[in-house]
């Protein structure tokens, strides 16, 4: 993946994306909590894709933004389709492209005629921005082939510092329709709990194959640990992360901020 240099002539969406690229792929460590959390999410997401699909498989990256997962998977040999509502980001992704097969499909993914086209679909950090996560996951499930997989990452709603509502406790999600699809944590509507993931998957005709919880309070710099994080060597942070991921499940779901779920589609989905 090429490293690009910002230009005054860039579009605003490019300028907005670039600071995230610095943290996510270019090694900037000014906000270590974010950088470490993203590195964990990236590692587990790519591992799951490689676990269930060989290079050459067709992968759809939904709401892919500046395309870092798209580019990484293309470099690993997958045939990737990049999608985002912001068409102007296509040329930004192309600036960073170095090798691999990428198709570009900007726009509303559900109106592009992709039903049953993909071996793997990525929905990373999206479902928490959606007012109707049940409808969203159901529609996504129709885009994956029978026998294919969805890799979904989202913040863990059972993390002990979560203050957002549980989706299943909300009697009228439509009240959030006007504010959905907002970027970053300010746009989070619900943070899903593990039991809700199971229910949403079942409703969408999917099966939860594997769930990974990751990024503990120290790794993310929460509870004012950001200052400590600047002083602790990276290998110590990784050791702490490995330790907390080995704890009993009842503890893990309380002290980890993120989750990535592998979902499978084993049969046709009825409308």
Image (spheres, helix red, strand yellow):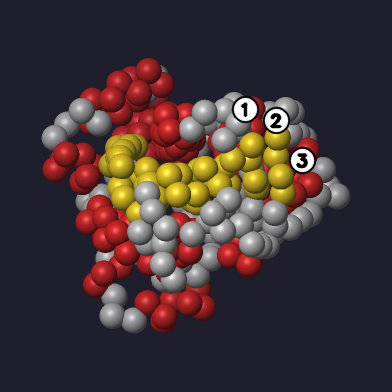
Nearest to viewer (mark 2 / mark 3): 2
> Residue 9's spot in the image, x, y percent?
86, 50
Q: Residues within 10 Å of mark 3 (few under 14, many from 20)?
A: some
Answer above or below: position of 210 versus 168.
above
Query: Residue at horizontal 62%, vertical 27%?
Result: 77
Query: Residue at horizontal 60%, vertical 31%?
Result: 56
Q: Is residue 259 left or right of residue 271?
A: left
Q: Residue furthest right?
A: 9
Q: Is residue 163 left or right of residue 24?
A: left
> Residue 110's spot in the image, x, y percent?
58, 65
Marks 2 and 1 sit apart, C-alpha to C-alpha, by 6 Å
Q: Mark on residue 94?
A: 3
Q: Are the residues tagged 2 and 1 within 8 Å (C-beta)?
A: yes
N-terminal label among 2 and 1: 1
Q: Are the residues tagged 3 and 1 within 8 Å (C-beta)?
A: no
Q: In the picture, which quadrant includes the N terminus?
A: top right
Q: Residues within 10 Å of mark 2 (few under 14, many from 20)?
A: some
Query: Residue at horizontal 65%, vertical 47%?
Result: 82
Q: Are the residues tagged 2 and 3 within 8 Å (C-beta)?
A: no
What kind of element bears circle 3?
A: helix
Nearest to viewer (mark 3 / mark 1): 1
Marks 2 and 3 sit apart, C-alpha to C-alpha, by 11 Å
Q: Which residue is mark 1?
A: 77
Q: Which residue is mark 2?
A: 100
What kind of element bears circle 2?
A: loop
> Residue 86's spot in the image, x, y percent?
69, 59
């Amino acid at each position: 993946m090429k490293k690009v240099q910002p230009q005054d002539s860039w579009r605003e969406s490019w300028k907005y994306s670039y600071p995230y690229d610095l943290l996510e792929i270019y090694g900037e460590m000014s906000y270590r909590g974010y950088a470490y959390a993203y590195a964990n999410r990236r590692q587990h997401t790519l591992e799951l894709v490689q676990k269930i699909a060989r290079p050459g498989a067709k992968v759809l990256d939904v709401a892919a933004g500046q395309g870092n997962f798209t580019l990484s998977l293309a470099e690993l040999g997958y045939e990737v389709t990049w999608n985002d509502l912001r068409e102007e980001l296509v040329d930004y992704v192309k600036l960073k492209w170095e090798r691999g097969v990428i198709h570009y499909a900007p726009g509303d993914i559900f109106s592009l005629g992709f039903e049953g086209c993909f071996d793997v679909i990525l929905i990373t950090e999206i479902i928490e921005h959606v007012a109707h996560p049940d409808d969203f996951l159901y529609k996504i499930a129709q885009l994956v082939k029978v026998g294919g997989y969805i890799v979904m990452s989202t913040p863990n709603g059972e993390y002990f510092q979560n203050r957002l509502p549980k989706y299943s406790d909300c009697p009228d999600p439509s009240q959030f329709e006007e504010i959905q699809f907002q970027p970053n944590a300010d746009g989070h509507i619900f943070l899903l709990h593990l039991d809700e993931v199971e229910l949403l998957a079942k409703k969408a005709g999917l099966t939860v194959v594997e769930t990974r919880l990751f990024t503990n309070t120290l790794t993310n710099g929460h509870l004012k640990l950001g200052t400590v994080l600047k002083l602790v060597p990276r290998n110590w942070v990784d050791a702490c992360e490995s330790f907390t991921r080995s704890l009993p499940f009842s503890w893990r779901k309380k002290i980890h901020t993120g989750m990535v779920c592998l979902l499978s589609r084993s049969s046709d989905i009825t409308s």
